Every structure is written in structure tokens, then in C-alpha cells.
Image (cartoon, rainbow, N blue to C red):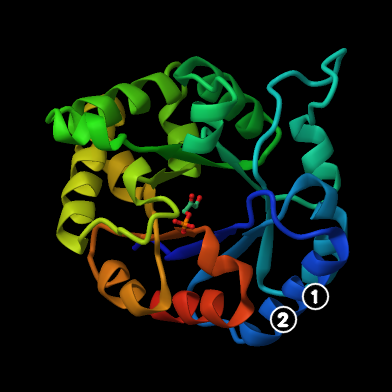
Amino acid sequence: MRTPLIAGNWKMYKTSSEATALAEAVVRALSTPDGTQVVVCPPFTALAAVGRVVAGSRIGLGAQDLHWAKEGAYTGEVSAEMLRDIGCRYVIIGHSERRQYFGETDESVNKKSCAALASNLIPIICIGETLAEREAGRAYAVVETQIKGALSGLTPEQVQQLILAYEPVWAIGTGQTATPGQAEEMHAHIRKTIALLFGAEIAHGVRILYGGSVKPDNAKELLGRSEIDGALVGGASLQADSFAAIAKAAIR
Ligand code: 13P
């Protein structure tokens, strides 16, 4: 079956020294293997320091973005190889904040996903509708378009390796989480869409995380749903105790 995965997206929080302290606390709190995977995604400037802390532990390291080119004159950007070199195994791609504030499109998400996979990085591809789209009854169609765009041209073998994160934009940082029923329904729809594109067997193996105001007090109920394979955690990942509590709620 699908191994649950809990990833902490630290967004633009934590200096290198603050990140080191948080990573040390996460390693301490989650030292025992329990059949789940745990990943932390600090900002670029803290990746090296956090990488040193989590090396040899069960905690994986992820970045929050990358550029699709191997190298070149792209001021301010970071390549997949650079992330691999510094110890990353995962990379978040297409977060709604990047789509909203930095012009990320399904096309750029697709290019970044291809580049990540080519360098042996596991993409955590974010999808999800806005409140206006949900209220207009377009949530399923929007998510379907995002999936088709993100996974365009990928082989079934590549799709099997990646992770999707359903993050309804209206639930991010708002304290208003999707109900377990709403999340599970959308996850089932996402899996069905992947099955139509890449076959039922591939769809069955793909992990789909939920993200959006996941907290220790709602984690158990969300993660208890069979279609929800883990969580992408923002605010609650910035403290070791709340992040560890969420990770422990994923134990099956
Ligand atoms: P919050 O958990 O703060 O709502 O953020 C979710 C998120 O955007 C994770 O990528």
C-alpha cells in the first residue's frame, strides 16, 4: 500500500540558525521509524544547514521550488542538480502561492516536474481550486486541468514516482480546512483522473497529500481517510511539537 508522507513547507520562514534549531527538534521528536515518511522543506538559504542536521536521520530534505534548466543565465534561480548536490530528495512544485504571486502556470509546473524527475528528485506537485472556483462549481474541472497540464508528456513510470498535493487555496493559512469528506472526494477524483490518463495501476500507487490548515487536532480525522496519503503542512510545521503530532497521526 501507499506509505503515508508528511511534509513540512516552511515557506519564507526561518533563518539558517532558526531552521537548524527547528530541524534538530524535529529529528529528536521523530527519531523512531513508524512506517511513515517525513520531509522538511526549508527556504533555499537554510537547505544546507538543515541537510546537515537531518543527514543519517529518517527525515528527508525538500526544496520549495526549482528552475527547469540545467544551468544558465537565470539570475536568482536554482537548478535540480544544485538541489540534489545539497542533499535534497524532494521538491515542492506549483504551490498556489507561486501560482498566485509569481506567475507559475501549468506549463511551468510541467517543465519543473520533468526537470526534477530527470535529476532523480521527487516532485510534490501542488494543485487546488480557489474559493471563487469552488463556489462556481468548477473545483473538479480546475483540478483536472491542473493535473493534465502538470503531467503532460510524462511516462507512467515517472508518474508513479511523483507525489500530488491537493491544497484548496481557500484552506491555506485560513484555519478553514476542507472537511475530511470534501478532501476525500477530491482525492478520489484526482486518482480517477490519473487512472484515465495513465492507467488504474499507476493511479492506485500515486500518493496524494492534503494541504490547507492541517493541525494536530484535525490531522487524525483527515489522515484516517483511505484516499488521503499524507499531508503538506504549512503553519503547523514551524513548531516541532505540532509537526510531530501531525506526523504521528499518520501512523496506520
Ligand atoms: P497552512 O498549513 O499554513 O494552511 O499551509 C498549507 C500549505 O500551503 C502547505 O504547502
Question: Residue flagged by tag 1: what amino acid is it?
Answer: Ala
**Residue extending farthest left:** 137
Whether residue 15 is situated above or below residue 119 in the rendered picture: below
Total marks in image:
2
- Name the image quarter holding the C terminus: bottom left
Crowding around mark 2 (Cα neighbors within 10 Å: few <14, some 14 to 19, many 20+) is some
Q: Are marks 2 and 1 in contact (CB under 8 Å)?
A: yes
Q: Position of residue 227 (x, y in %)?
A: 24, 57
Whether residue 109 is situated above or below residue 219 in the rendered picture: above
Q: Tell me the tag on residue 179.
A: none
Q: Secondary structure at mark 2?
A: helix
Q: Is residue 95 visible?
A: no
Q: Is residue 180 visible?
A: yes
Q: Position of residue 250 (x, y in %)?
A: 40, 74
Q: Which residue is mark 1?
A: 21
- Dividing the picture into quadrants, the one containing residue 8 is bottom right
Q: Nearer the viewer, residue 218 or 53?
A: 218
Q: Position of residue 184 (x, y in %)?
A: 20, 55
Q: Residue drawn 63% across and 86% down? A: 29
Q: Nearer the viewer, residue 136 or 232?
A: 136
Q: Is residue 92 left or right of residue 144?
A: right
- Dividing the picture into quadrants, the one containing residue 64 is top right
Q: Which residue is mark 2?
A: 25
